[in-house]
Image: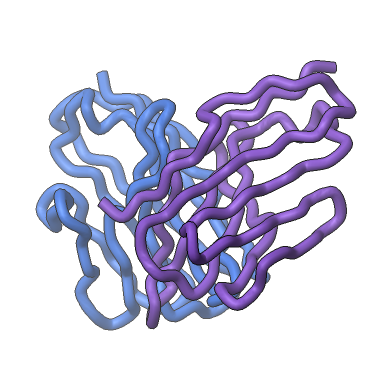
Chain colours: A purple, B blue
Amino acid sequence: SQQGEEDPQALSIQEGENATMNCSYKTSINNLQWYRQNSGRGLVHLILIRSNEREKHSGRLRVTLDTSKKSSSLLITASRAADTASYFCATDDFGNEKLTFGTGTRLTIIP
Amino acid sequence: SAVISQKPSRDICQRGTSLTIQCQVDSQVTMMFWYRQQPGQSLTLIATANQGSEATYESGFVIDKFPISRPNLTFSTLTVSNMSPEDSSIYLCSAGLYTEAFFGQGTRLTVV
């Protein structure tokens, strides 16, 4: 299986704290993306980082990518109750739009 | 961006029956994807659907069990055939636009 691994599997933090999730993958990639899923619904795209980038920011999100270690991290700063969701990393398959998803991190923000 | 309407949003079905899930995209897309998400798990790709050709299935998924139609560039259906309780999952359709994928809201299927 090409599926990546994410850790932790579950994370609970107090509102206002920062949350960090990690993703490891197995093959060379073109880009890596992070998605959020609320309560088993559809996924929402958060951020994309290309293989030649090391860090990217979007609002309260910061993503890093280390292609030598085949790993990425997602940092959510100043967490809010609305950030409670499952977060998945996804890597692409060169030449097409097929995505392979990681195992996911279930994040709970405690008000 | 793209908006994907997926229906039904949920259904409870008897074993041995079939359910067809529909996805409508508000713009033309080359490829659409169907995923299965078993309870508490990640997404697993079932198949890739191109307009005008047969769908390409991933290992472990077969056309007889999950027939797919893709009649045009904005619409696709997935049928879950001869259902058993093991088919209880969330099924999601997706359309890619290279830099990001857009998802329907999912169909939560329970087979009893």
Q: Position of residue A110 (x, y in %)?
A: 78, 17
- From this view, report whether residue B38 is shown above or below residue A52: above
Q: Position of residue B69 (x, y in %)?
A: 28, 66
Q: Position of residue B14 (x, y in %)?
A: 23, 24
Instruction: From the viewer's perspective, tell me whether residue A26 is left or right of residue A33.
Output: left
Classify residue B56 by image quadrant.
bottom left
Q: Position of residue B112 (x, y in %)?
A: 25, 18
Q: Image point 85% across, 49% down: which residue?
A: A60
State the residue in front, A20 or B84: A20
Q: Image point 63% across, 67% down: which residue?
A: A49
- From this view, report whether residue A51 is shown above or below residue A95: above
Classify residue A80 by image quadrant.
top right
Q: Image point 40% across, 45% down: which residue?
A: B43
How many numbered discs sit on the rendered protein? 0
Quadrant that contains the C terminus of chain A = top right
Classify residue A31 by image quadrant.
bottom right
Instruction: From the viewer's perspective, tell me whether residue B106 is left or right of residue A27.
Output: right
Q: Image point 23% across, 69% down: which residue?
A: B55
